[in-house]
Amino acid sequence: MKILTVLTYYRPHTSGLTIYAERLAEAFVRRGHEVTVFTSHFDPSTPREEIRNGVRIVRSPVAFRLSKGVIMPLFGWQVTQLVAKHDVVQLHLPQFDAPGVALRARLFGKPAVLTYHCDLQLPSGLFNRLVNSVVHFQNNMAGRLANRIVTYTQDYADHSPYLSRYKHKLTTFLPPVVLPDPQPGSPEAFAQKYKTQENRPVIGMAARFAAEKGVEVLLDALPQIIEKYPRAQVLFAGQYRDVMGERAYYGRLMPRIREYEAAGHWTFLGVLNPVQMAAFYPNLDALVVPSLNSTEAFGLVQIEAMLHNVPCVASALPGVRQPVRMHGMGNVAAIGSADELATGLLDIFDHKEKFRCDTAELARLYDPESVAENYEKLFMQLM
């Protein structure tokens, strides 16, 4: 089968959406399919076209940016040629260009499947409200033109204004989650470097430094944690400098974070590759996902942590609360509540024996091969 995957950002951009898309595309290749990813050439240092882990990546030139979106003058011409040469089209939403791609799929008689990752909610402001309205319109047009829509959980679908319109087209698949085994000695080396084994609880956060991720909720919870555990430490894995559209947010929070850094309570790790993440998780006592709005639909990092028997405290957002609820690995805190986040963490630190799971069964549920097989069956039904 020839599968065309279309999304605005792909690797080397790092987000839950791009990680999902990469894992799924590479699983398709391992299962014998030809996969082309069509995306934006947002990073001029990357090639216009390349093969990575068996996946052909084609990048369309970017003329300029609008907020977090990109304008690609050659996109329509290029995607027309690609749709004509493939058997099925898979689109990752939110995506401004999705309805044009779905229309081409319909015209060429090719099934179009949307994978809907989250509702878009840009920060307040007149321009961002306009961008939100345009993207919502585009997503709705794509939903009408697509044959089927895939999302992570029914919980998220039931609360999403977008997905509730398309219940007759909806299918839920758990997302693909996998991490390599840590290299021999790497968790121990990580522990030595960041002093995680010095009788103190270690709190992990793995995310972009972005307003919707709720970094300030963790900051507000820290005084309660430190009061009981004076040597508590936060390890923040992910991009924190120069995050697109987050300069003001970064500037607002960094003075407080610098104080915690100076006291040894906070460390930025930067972007970690999968092998490094496999050394990161075993050094945590808990992971937090204090996200604030529906731009977060699940939190793949929760499953990555649980695969290392690390419990999580997640906000009570639809979808985001599901990993903890489904697998009994942590606590749920009210959205934006620093008090409940602190209470959830302290419960984990005080009762570690409660939070254990069958990691082999968890790996089976989220195996990219299993997810790819679900998509294959859906594609074949539509074809």
Image (cartoon, rainbow, N blue to C red):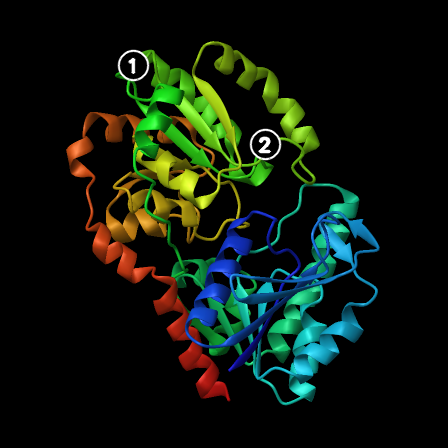
Q: Residues within 10 Å of mark 2 (few under 14, many from 20)?
A: some
Side of 59 relative to 203 (left or right): right
Q: Give coordinates of residue 231: x percent, y percent.
A: 34, 13
In this picture, residue 222 sits left or right of residue 323: right
Q: Residue furthest front?
A: 184
Residue 138 on image: x %, y %: 70, 66
The answer to whether residue 6 of the structure is visible from this angle is: yes
Residue drawn at the location 15% of the way across and 34% of the way down:
353
x and y percentages locating residue 150 in the rendered image: 48, 69
Gap in Å between the C-alphas at discs 2 and 1? Answer: 28 Å
Q: Give x and y (percent) for residue 245.
A: 70, 39
User: Is there CB contact under 8 Å for labels 2 and 1?
Assistant: no
Local packing at callout 1 (Cα closer than 10 Å; few below 14, some 14-19, many 20+) is few
**Residue that sits furthest to the left in the current view:** 353
Type of amino acid at the residue the image marks with label 2: Tyr
Q: Tell me the element at label 1.
A: helix
Task: Please tell me in which quadrant of the rendered image residue 221 appears.
Answer: top left
Quarter of the image where one finds residue 89: bottom right
The residue under label 1 is which amino acid type? Lys
User: In which image quadrant can residue 162 be found?
Assistant: bottom right
Tell me the number on the disc at residue 310. Answer: none
Viewer-side residue, 210 vs 325: 210
Is the residue 109 above or below the residue 16 in the image?
Answer: below
- Identify the residue at horizontal 37%, vertical 49% (top origin): 179
* Residue position marked by numbered label 1 in the rendering: 228
Secondary structure of residue under mark 2 = loop
Q: Is residue 142 above or below residue 180?
A: below
- 250 relative position to 63: left or right: left
| Residue placed under numbered mark 2 in the picture | 240
Q: Is residue 332 visible?
A: no
Residue 196's place in the image compared with 66, above or below, is above
